[in-house]
Image (cartoon, helix red, strand yellow):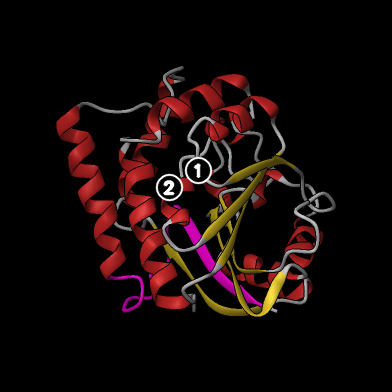
Amino acid sequence: MDRAAYSSMSAQEADHWWFVARRAIISHLIERHVPLGDDARILEAGCGTGGNLSLLAGYGRLDAFEYDADARALAAGHGIGTIAGGALPHDIGFGDTDYDMIALLDVLEHIDDDRASLAALGGRLKTDGRLLLTVPAVPWLWSDHDALHHHKRRYTRESLQVVAQDAGMQVQAIGYFNSLLFPLAVMQRIAHQVTRSKAALDARPSAPVNAMLKGIFAAERHLVDHIRFPIGLSLYAVLSR
């Protein structure tokens, strides 16, 4: 990603509504779909500036890798887990360690060879391990935000399922989320295009608006297992070998 994107992420991921609510949903998905024992080994692939490390470390012994040196330094500054350099698909590191859970959170869209990356991570799962991933959804929502963050693609439920199956993975659960705010996001992107605004789409709003959006988005953790949302800004998938 651009340096500006990493700086923005580092500054906002502690309290920006999107990061906070997404962590709540990720926590729910782990507890619902990932069988973890008392001494679970966990890997975060592409940990960025480290905003998910505290959450993931709550479920077991955590390793993480990150390609970008500046982002990796920020992640290491959290003092959580073991942070190393690495890249997908061929430089995962950490020896021959196999993992009970691998988290790939808004990373796959940055990688040229998404199938090879999923296959490589699948090879590092224990027999009953799970790969939890999230990606941006709906290709026609492509915006300047995607370009700034060096995304290669946005996914649909069907395209993500095909990529996972082509990588030799079994899809245990898959679905859209960040759906309740989808109409608002579409209107925001239309307005952004019409006005040719240079304002960042992911800028943190005022405190009251931030709290409202966080509450709406986080509420989806109670819904994702009961409602098959037809569309959303993001997709999750839980995969096994």
Which kind of residue does numbered mark 2 sit on? Ser
Q: Residue furthest left?
A: 208
Q: Residue at x 30, y 44 (%)?
A: 184
Specify the label residue 80 is tagged with.
1
Q: Residue at x 80, y 53 (%)?
A: 89
Q: Position of residue 78 (x, y in %)?
A: 48, 35
Q: Dots 1 and 2: beta carbons under 8 Å?
A: yes
Q: Nearer the viewer, residue 142 or 9?
A: 9
Q: Is residue 237 left or right of residue 195?
A: right
Q: Residue at x 18, y 29 (%)?
A: 207
Image quadrant where residue 116 sits: bottom right
In this rendering, the count of numbered labels is 2
Specify the label residue 135 is tagged with.
none
Can residue 187 be found in the magenta stretch? no
Q: Within 10 angstroms of label 1, few (less than 14), some, or many (20 or more) residues?
A: some
Q: Is residue 153 left or right of residue 236?
A: right
Relative to 175, residue 70 above or below: above
**Which segment did they paint magenta?**
223-240
Q: Tell me which label, 1 or 2, sits earlier in the chain.
A: 2
Q: Nearer the viewer, residue 220 or 183?
A: 220
| Secondary element at tag 1 | loop
Q: Residue furthest top?
A: 198
Magenta region, mostly helix, strand or loop?
loop
Can residue 234 be found in the magenta stretch? yes
Q: Position of residue 99 (x, y in %)?
A: 65, 67
Q: Is residue 144 left or right of residue 189?
A: right
Task: Say which of marks 1 and 2 sits in front.
Answer: 1
Q: Is residue 182 left or right of residue 113?
A: left
Specify the label residue 54 is tagged with.
2
Q: Nearer the viewer, residue 40 or 50?
A: 40
Q: Within 10 angstroms of label 2, few (less than 14), some, or many (20 or more) residues?
A: some
